[in-house]
Image (cartoon, grey):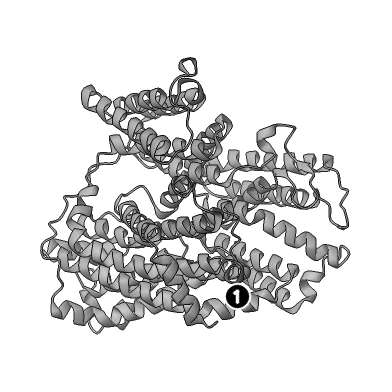
C-alpha cells in the first residue's frame, strides 16, 4: 500500500470536517418539541467520533513505514484533465446551451481526448447519443429537459 | 391470507406486461453490467435509478415503486450472471464476486470447454436464485413479524449492528471504514431535520434544505469514481477472448457439478443474509469449501468444473439472500442493497417490517419477479452468451464518456439543478481518491441512507426514557444487538492483533 501521505492529509481533512460539524452544531437551536434530545446532539456526537477516528488514523500513518511506490503505468493526467474540465463546463452550461448541443460537444471532446482522430465517426456517435437520449426522454417519455439554447426558445 | 396467497398475488403483479418488460430490461442491462469490467453492480444500479424514475414517471406511486425495484433488482442479480462470462472467457472478472471463478473457469476455456463452464455457471446461478427466493418466501413473514415488535431502541441498535457489520468487513483498514461511516452519517444530517423542522448546516442555501440527494452522491461515488479511475489508469489489453464453443454442458459435467451447485447455493444464501458479508465472500468461501470436500483437490486450478459451479451459485444465492434483511428489517447489508433501499425511499416506500403489510404488492411482486427474472436470465444466457461476450469488445473510448453523460443526464433529469451536477462531479473525484487509497465507499453510502433513520430512532428512544442513554442496554433485544455489533468490531481487531489474516469483503 502506498497510502501513507494521502492518509495523513485525509486524516487532517476529515478531522476538520468533523470539527466543522461539531462547532456548527452548537449554532443549531437545541429546542425540541416534546423531545429530550434536540437536533444538535446527533451531529455533535458524530463530529466528535469523526475527529477521534481521524486522530487514530493519523497515529496509524505515523507508525507505518512508508513504502516506495511500486512502478506503475504513468497516469493519463492529460486526458483526465480534459475530460474533467469538459464535464465541469458541461454541468455549468447544460441549462444555458440546452441538452442537445452541450451533450454533443462534451461527448465529442471526450472521445477525442480518449483517442485522437476519426472525428467523423466520433461526431456521429456523439450526435446520435445526444439525439436518442433527448428523443426518448422528452418525446417518448414526456420528461422535461432544456432542449435548445435559451435564446432560441 | 397465507404466504401462498401473497405469492400468487405477487405473480399477478409480476406478470403484468410492463413489469415483465421491466424485469427483462433489468436482467439484460444487469448482464451487460456484469460483463463490462469497470462497472460493478453498485454503479450499475445507481446509474439506472434516474432512468427508471423517468420510465415510471406516469404511473401511480406504488406501481411505479414496484416496477422500478423490479428493474433495479434485476440489474443486481443479472450482474452476478454476467460477471462469470468475462471471468471464464477473458480471465478478467467483471465483478469482484467472480474473482474466484477465473481460477478454474479460464483454465476450462483454455481447454476448449468455455461453453460448458458458461452454461454450468448459468444453471448454477439459476438454481441458486430459486433457492434464495424460496428462502426469502419462507423467512419474510416470520422475520417481519418479529421486527414489528421492535421499538425505537431496538431499531437503533439493529441499525448500528448493520453499520458495524458492513464497516467491520469492508476493506483493509477498519479505522478508514468507520471514518467513512461517520462521514456518511454526518452528511445525512445536512438539511431540514425531520423531527424538529430545524434547518441544519444549510446556511440559507435553498438547494441544501432538502439535504444532499442520495442519488447524486451514489452515482458520483461509484459510477463517476470508477470512470475517472479507468480514464487515469490506462488498461493494458487483456488476454485474448477464448472461443465459446458448445454451450450445452455434457452429462458428466452436469453430474459433477450438481452437488457443488446445491452446496454453493445454501452456503451463499446464508452468507448473503448476514449483513456485511456479500457475494464476494460467499463465492470465496464456497470455492474453499469445495476444494476441501473434493476427493482430488489437485484438480482445482486446472479447470475443475466444481470450481466454477460452486462460486457462481454462491454469489447469486448471496445476492438473493441479501434482499432478506433489506426487505424484512429495512437494514441493507451491502453497498448495492443500500442503493436499492435509497431507491425505494425515493418512491416513499420504506423497506422494513411494515413493507409486507403496507405495500404487499411491492414486496411480493419483487419476490415473484425475481423468480421470473432468473428464468429469463437462464434463457438469455444459454443461447445468447456469444452475443454478451461481444459486449466486452465495446471500445472504452466511447463507453467512458457515455457513462459520464448518462450520470449527468440521470442526475439532471431527477434533480434539475446545476448544483447537483457539480456535487456529482465532486463526489466522483472524492470517490476516485478515496477508493484509490483503500477507503471503502459502501459504508459512506450506507451511513447516508441509514443516517436519518438511526437518528430518529435514537431520539425517539431517548425521548421515552427522558434522555437516559441506558435505555439501549436495558431492553434485552437492543442489548443483544449492541453486544453483537461490539463483537463484530472487536473480533477482527483481536484476530488482527494475533497476526491472523482477516478475510475482508472487497465488494462492500
Q: How many neighbours does mark 1 have within 10 angstroms: few (below 14), some (14-19), or many (20 or more)?
A: many
Residue A118 visible: no
Q: Mark 1 falls within which chain?
A: B
Task: Say which of B18 and B235 sits in front.
Answer: B18
Q: Position of residue A68 (x, y in %)?
A: 43, 42
Q: Left or right: B186 with respect to B169?
A: right
Which residue is painted at 16% across and 65% down in the image? B115
Q: Position of residue B434 (x, y in %)?
A: 51, 44
Which residue is painted at 86% across and 57% down in the image? A35
Q: Left or right: B342 with respect to B47?
A: right
* Residue B187, quarter of the rendered image: top right
* Residue B100, quarter of the rendered image: bottom left
Numbered circles on residues, count: 1
Q: Position of residue B117 (x, y in %)?
A: 20, 67
Q: Left or right: B332 with respect to B391?
A: right
Q: Left or right: B444 with respect to B230?
A: right
Q: Is residue A37 above or below residue B359?
A: above
Task: Say which of B153 and B346 sits in front.
Answer: B346
Which residue is painted at 40% across and 60% down in the image? B19
Placement of the N terminus of chain B among the 4 image quadrants: bottom right
Task: Say which of B496 and B396 sits in front.
Answer: B396
* Residue B462, quarter of the rendered image: bottom right
Residue assigned mark 1: B144
Q: Position of residue B3 (x, y in %)?
A: 50, 81
Q: Is residue A5 above or below residue B366?
A: above
Residue B287 visible: yes
Residue at disc 1, secondary structure: helix
Amino acid at each position: 500500500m502506498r497510502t501513507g501521505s494521502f492518509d495523513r492529509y485525509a486524516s487532517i481533512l476529515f478531522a476538520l470536517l468533523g470539527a466543522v460539524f461539531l462547532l456548527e452544531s452548537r449554532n443549531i437551536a437545541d429546542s425540541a418539541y416534546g423531545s429530550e434530545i434536540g437536533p444538535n446532539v446527533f451531529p455533535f456526537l458524530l463530529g466528535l467520533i469523526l475527529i477521534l477516528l481521524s486522530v487514530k488514523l493519523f497515529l496509524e500513518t505515523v507508525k507505518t513505514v512508508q513504502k516506495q511506490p511500486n512502478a506503475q503505468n504513468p497516469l493519463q493526467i492529460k486526458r483526465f484533465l480534459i475530460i474533467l474540465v469538459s464535464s465541469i463546463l458541461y454541468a455549468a452550461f447544460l441549462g444555458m446551451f440546452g441538452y442537445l448541443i452541450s451533450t454533443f460537444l462534451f461527448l465529442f471532446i471526450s472521445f477525442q481526448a480518449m483517442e485522437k482522430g476519426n472525428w467523423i465517426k466520433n461526431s456521429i456517435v456523439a450526435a446520435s447519443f445526444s439525439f436518442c437520449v433527448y428523443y426518448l426522454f422528452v418525446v417518448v417519455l414526456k420528461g422535461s429537459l432544456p432542449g435548445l439554447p435559451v435564446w432560441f426558445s | 391470507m397465507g404466504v401462498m396467497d401473497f405469492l400468487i398475488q405477487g405473480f399477478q403483479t409480476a406478470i403484468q406486461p410492463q413489469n415483465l418488460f421491466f424485469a427483462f430490461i433489468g436482467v439484460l442491462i444487469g448482464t451487460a453490467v456484469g460483463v463490462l469490467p469497470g462497472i460493478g453492480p453498485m454503479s450499475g444500479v445507481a446509474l439506472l435509478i434516474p432512468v427508471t424514475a423517468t420510465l415510471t414517471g406516469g404511473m401511480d406511486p406504488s406501481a411505479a415503486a414496484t416496477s422500478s425495484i423490479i428493474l433495479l433488482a434485476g440489474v443486481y442479480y443479472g450482474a452476478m450472471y454476467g460477471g462469470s462470462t468475462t471471468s471464464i472467457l477473458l480471465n478478467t472478472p467483471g465483478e469482484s464476486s467472480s474473482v474466484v471463478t477465473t481460477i478454474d473457469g479460464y483454465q476450462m476455456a483454455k481447454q476448449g470447454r468455455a461453453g460448458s463452464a458458461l452454461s454450468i455457471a448459468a444453471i448454477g446461478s439459476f438454481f441458486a436464485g430459486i433457492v434464495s427466493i424460496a428462502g426469502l418466501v419462507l423467512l419474510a413473514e416470520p422475520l417481519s413479524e418479529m421486527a414489528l415488535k421492535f421499538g425505537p431502541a431496538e431499531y437503533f441498535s439493529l441499525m448500528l449492528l448493520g453499520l458495524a457489520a458492513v464497516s467491520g468487513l469492508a476493506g483493509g483498514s477498519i479505522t478508514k471504514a468507520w471514518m467513512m461511516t461517520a462521514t456518511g452519517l454526518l452528511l445525512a444530517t445536512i438539511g431540514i431535520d425531520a423531527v424538529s423542522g430545524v434547518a441544519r448546516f444549510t446556511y440559507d442555501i435553498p438547494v441544501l434544505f432538502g439535504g444532499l440527494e442520495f442519488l447524486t452522491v451514489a452515482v458520483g461515488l461509484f459510477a463517476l469514481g470508477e470512470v475517472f479511475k479507468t480514464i487515469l489508469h490506462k488498461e493494458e489489453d487483456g488476454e485474448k477472448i477464448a472461443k465459446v464453443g458448445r454451450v450445452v454442458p455434457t452429462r458428466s459435467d452436469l453430474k459433477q457439478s450438481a452437488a457443488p451447485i446445491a452446496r454453493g447455493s445454501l452456503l451463499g444464501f446464508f452468507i448473503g443474509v448476514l449483513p456485511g458479508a456479500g457475494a464476494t465472500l460467499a463465492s470465496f468461501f464456497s470455492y474453499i469449501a469445495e476444494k476441501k470436500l473434493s476427493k482430488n483437490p489437485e484438480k482445482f486450478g486446472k479447470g475443475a468444473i466444481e470450481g466454477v459451479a460452486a462460486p457462481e451459485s454462491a454469489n447469486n444465492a448471496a445476492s438473493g439472500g441479501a434482499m432478506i434483511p433489506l426487505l424484512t428489517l429495512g437494514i441493507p447489508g451491502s453497498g448495492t442493497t443500500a442503493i436499492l433501499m435509497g431507491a425505494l425511499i425515493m418512491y416513499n416506500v420504506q423497506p422494513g417490517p411494515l413493507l409486507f403489510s403496507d405495500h404487499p404488492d411491492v414486496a411480493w411482486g419483487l419476490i415473484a419477479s425475481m423468480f421470473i427474472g432468473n428464468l429469463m436470465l437462464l434463457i438469455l444466457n444459454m443461447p445468447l452468451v456469444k452475443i454478451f461476450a461481444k459486449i466486452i469488445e465495446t471500445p472504452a473510448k466511447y463507453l467512458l464518456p457515455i457513462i459520464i453523460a448518462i450520470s449527468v443526464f440521470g442526475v439532471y433529469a431527477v434533480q434539475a439543478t446545476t448544483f447537483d451536477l457539480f456535487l456529482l462531479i465532486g463526489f466522483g473525484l472524492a470517490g476516485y481518491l478515496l477508493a484509490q487509497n483503500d477507503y471503502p465507499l459502501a459504508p459512506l453510502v450506507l451511513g447516508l441512507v441509514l443516517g436519518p433513520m438511526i437518528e430518529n430512532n435514537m431520539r425517539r428512544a431517548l425521548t421515552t426514557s427522558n434522555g437516559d442513554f441506558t435505555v439501549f442496554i436495558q431492553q434485552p433485544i437492543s442489548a443483544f444487538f449492541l453486544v453483537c455489533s461490539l463483537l463484530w468490531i472487536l473480533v477482527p481487531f483481536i484476530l488482527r492483533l494475533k497476526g491472523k489474516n482477516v478475510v475482508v469483503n472487497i465488494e462492500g
